[in-house]
Image: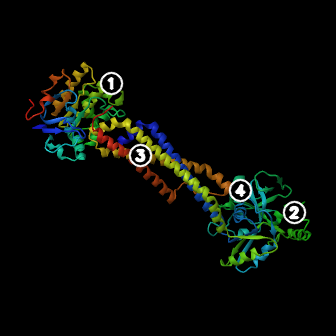
Amino acid sequence: MSQISVSDFSFVWPGSSAAVLQNASLNVEAGERVMLRGPSGSGKSTLLAAISGVIDIPKRAVTVAGQDIGALPASKRDRFRADHMGLIFQVFNLVPWLSAVDNILLPCRFSKRRRDRIAGPLDKEAHRLMAALGLKPDTLGAFQASTLSVGQQQRVAAARALIGAPEVILADEPTSALDPDTKDSFMQLLSQQAQDSGAALLMVSHDEGLDRHFDRVVEMSALSGVGAYQ
Amino acid sequence: MKLVVQSVLNRRFVVSLTVFAIALSVALILSVERLRDSARTSFANSASGVDLIIAPRSNDVQILLATLFGVGSTGTGMSGDVVALLKDMPGVAWTVPLMQGDNHKGFPVIGTSDAYFEHFKHSRGKALVFAQGTPFADPQSAVIGAEVAERLSYGLGTEIVNAHGAGSIALEVHDEAPFDVTGILARTNTAVDRMVFVSLQGFEAIHAEGKAHPADPLAALTQEDHAQNGDDNFVPVQINAAYVGLSNRTAVLGIQRAIATYTEDPLSAVMPNVALLQLWSITGTAESALRLMSLAVVVASMIGMVVMLSAALEARRREFAILRAVGASPRDVVVMIVAEALLVTASGILIGLLIFWSGILLAEPLLSAQFGVTLGGQSLNASETVLLLTILCFGALASLLPAWRVYRMTLADGLTTKL
């Protein structure tokens, strides 16, 4: 079953005359890891915004975990995002004055579903994810997010996206601020954890060297047109 | 909610400044209101048992302040015979003669008769009660108010010496004529607490010595005759004022007319409640100005809070974007802002109350000693509670401005962090 299904989706930003996306189609299965590659301005971020439900889109264009995103009102989309999606951004992923653990547990404050999917105490799960992502939970867990290095921050962000096992993980160039070595190990861990949790991972990037961490690489230029992917 | 608290703690310096500004403004407005209210009740309580004050012609407010509160003086005297004259008027239940012009260590000294303790009523009809001792036993007796006894640690039998004049600086001390304290009045929370009462004979004797009235040898004679008796029917040559109690309220007009046409001395008949209204209308402008100022301070502190919230919005854009990414709706973010404003305002009000209460603790003894005004303790009355709730609501209302901005901002920003 495809967790993310985009079919024949076009989008024009309000006030702009040219469409950023034209008849785009894309499917991502559960447990599948897909890299979406393209130059800036090719509509990568718009696509992520549409999938995560931040922008208003027409009905029957985007389906996530079986739910038509365009059919939900804005407030329901926020709730839906909290319940079913984990997001990782390029930089500034963390609330600077919260500890690493509190940052990881943020989605659990807004989503009862994510909370309920964690067996046992929340802190323990946050620590487990930190350890799985190569962070020492005992020392770093209580650190304020602003005191962590960029690489550590991105891992904490990954742990936050993964907590409560959401169906879909969206990543918007999460590696662009990292140096090559860190990049590779970060992708390794994220990819591994996404697979372990059975989530569909959709990552947007223009990085060439990360292909091996993905099941499939889709060029933005190939999105348009019916059945253009693959 | 926990998020709001943590976010506030992260910005604790600016937030605590804002809280402090609100606290000060709350304390200020509460103090102004409380001072005004207690001054009014206290004055009204002091004046409640006297129907008319007869004094040499002067300003009504001046007479009121001088007689009932011992502030200032009535100026010239009037003939002691007026009291007898008043007593015979229809509708008059009682009269109390008053002599003034001395002080004891800053507390006003009143020369009067036992009738004062018998008839004077305060705080809506309460009679004066002796905590210790009795009324005047002889011309050298003195009765002191509760505040005087407490302040100066006087007890029964203490010998006191009065000074001429109204201030606390003794220009001319009557140390040749000391008085013995024979009675101490129970606390009334009115101006009576800070008064020293001596008998008419005693009061007159001090002033008679060395400066008898040469223009009226007859009067000097009568005075000496009576001084030895020490009875209640003693009629001094000159008194400063007289309290009148009526058995029939409607008699007021008749008495006022009689007093106005009294030929021997120009006299005034003052109704204390009417004079109080006059006093309030005089002080009213200053009061309103003070209230307006304290309201302005409250508004200013609220604006300060809005400025703080608004200024922080830009810096918190990232925070909001992250919260939205993990599932917070723009409405959640708005709720956070309003909750923060409520938290700040509420802590401001609480700290303001603490300042206000400690202010009362500090100021009460002072005000009580100087003016006989009591501040009515820690509990808040209805209008003060309403005031505080209004401030709280106003704080929430004011926060809607930055909240609306943040709503627009989060909608526009979406999840992208443009930094």
Q: Quadrant of the N terminus of chain A?
A: top left
Residue hosting label 4:
B148
Q: Quadrant of the C terminus of chain A?
A: top left
Q: Chain of mark 1?
A: A
Q: Nearer the viewer, mark 4 or mark 2?
A: 2
Residue hosting label 2:
B208
Q: Nearer the viewer, mark 3 or mark 4?
A: 3
Say yes or no: labels 3 and 4 on the same chain.
yes
Q: Amino acid at mark 1?
A: Ser
Asked whether residue A152 is in view, the answer is yes
Q: Nearer the viewer, mark 2 or mark 3?
A: 3
Q: Which mark, residue A149? A: 1
Q: Amino acid at mark 4?
A: Val
Closer to us: B52 or B137: B52
The residues bearing labels 4 and 2 have C-alpha atoms spaced at a distance of 26 Å
Residues tagged 4 and 2 counted as in contact (Cβ below 8 A):
no
Residue hosting label 3:
B341
